[in-house]
Image (tube, grey):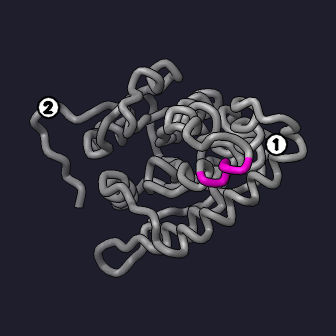
Amino acid sequence: MTGTIWAAIFDVDGVLVDSPHERAWREALARYADPARFTTEFYQAHVAGKPRLEGARSALERLGVPNVAARAEEYAETKQALIDRLIERGSFEAFPDAVRLAAALHAAGLKLALASSSKNAEVMLRQIELPGGRTLLSVFDADLSGREVPHGKPDPALFLLAAEALGMLPAHCMVVEDAPSGIKAARAGGMAALAIARLHDEALLRDAGADLVLTSLDQLDIPALIRGAVRARPIGETASHE
C-alpha cells in the first residue's frame, strides 16, 4: 500500500512498551485454569488487542472454562488489579526502537496517536522520559487508548476514531502494530499497516496483511515513508533518528 502518510497510529503493548499485560492475564487465570496453558502465542492469538472483557471471554472460552458469562468479568477485574499494581511498581520497559521512531516521526512533522485497548497507556508513557525532559506521551497528539468501542480489533473502529481525532483521512494514516488482529484492523480501516515482529511471528503478521514486517523499527525508511512508500531502509544505510 502506498500513498502520502501524514499520521501514524501506535498500538502500545508490544509496540511501544513491554508491558505486564500478558503476565497479569496469566497470573489472574490461576483460579480458572492452568496458567501454563496461557502461553505468549495464546495471548497474541486470542487476547492481545481486545478490550478487557472481550479478552477475558476469549481466553476462558478457548481454555474450555465452564460458565464463561459469569466468570469473565471477575477474571477481567482480577487481571486489572494485578496490572495496576505491576505498573505502579514500574514493572515495564519501553522498547528503544519504538521510542526513537515515535520521536523521529514527531520531529518530521507527522501527527501521532495512541490507539490501544489498554487503559494504562497514559500512566506508562508518562513515566518514559525523552531527552530534554519531555515524556514519551508528549509527542502524541491524541490518545484513544482505553476508549470504549462497539467491537475490538480486528474491527477498525478504534483506529478510525484515532484518525478522526488527528483530523486525517484513513488513507493518510499508518498503523504500527505487533498483533495480527491489529494489522487486520488497520487494513479494514483503509490504513497502511506496519508490523513489528518481536516474537519471531513474521509469517503470521504477513498473513494478516501487513504492508511491511520489521524486526526493529529502526529499519523503517522514514524519508521514503513521507514520500508515500512504507519500506525498510536499504541494507547498510544507517538510521538518522535524533
Magenta stretch: includes residue 29: yes
Q: Which residue lies at the image location 71% right of the left edge and 47% below the top edge?
A: 51
Name the disc covering residue 235, or none. Answer: 2
The location of residue 190, given as percent across then percent down, is: 60, 30
Q: Say whether residue 213 is visible.
A: yes
The location of residue 25, given as percent across then percent down, is: 62, 50
| Viewer-nearest residue: 219 or 41 | 41
Q: In screen coordinates, is 101 left or right of 14?
A: left
SS state under label 2: loop
SS state under label 1: loop
Amino acid on which the number 2 mark rests in the picture: Ile
The location of residue 142, given as percent across then percent down, is: 59, 61
Circle 2 crowding by C-alpha within 10 Å: few under 14, some 14–19, many from 20: few
Which quadrant: the C terminus?
bottom left
Residue 40 vertical position relative to residue 115 in the rendered view, above or below: above
| Viewer-nearest residue: 37 or 4 | 37
Circle 1 crowding by C-alpha within 10 Å: few under 14, some 14–19, many from 20: few
Magenta segment: 27-31
Q: In screen coordinates, is 102 left or right of 36?
A: left
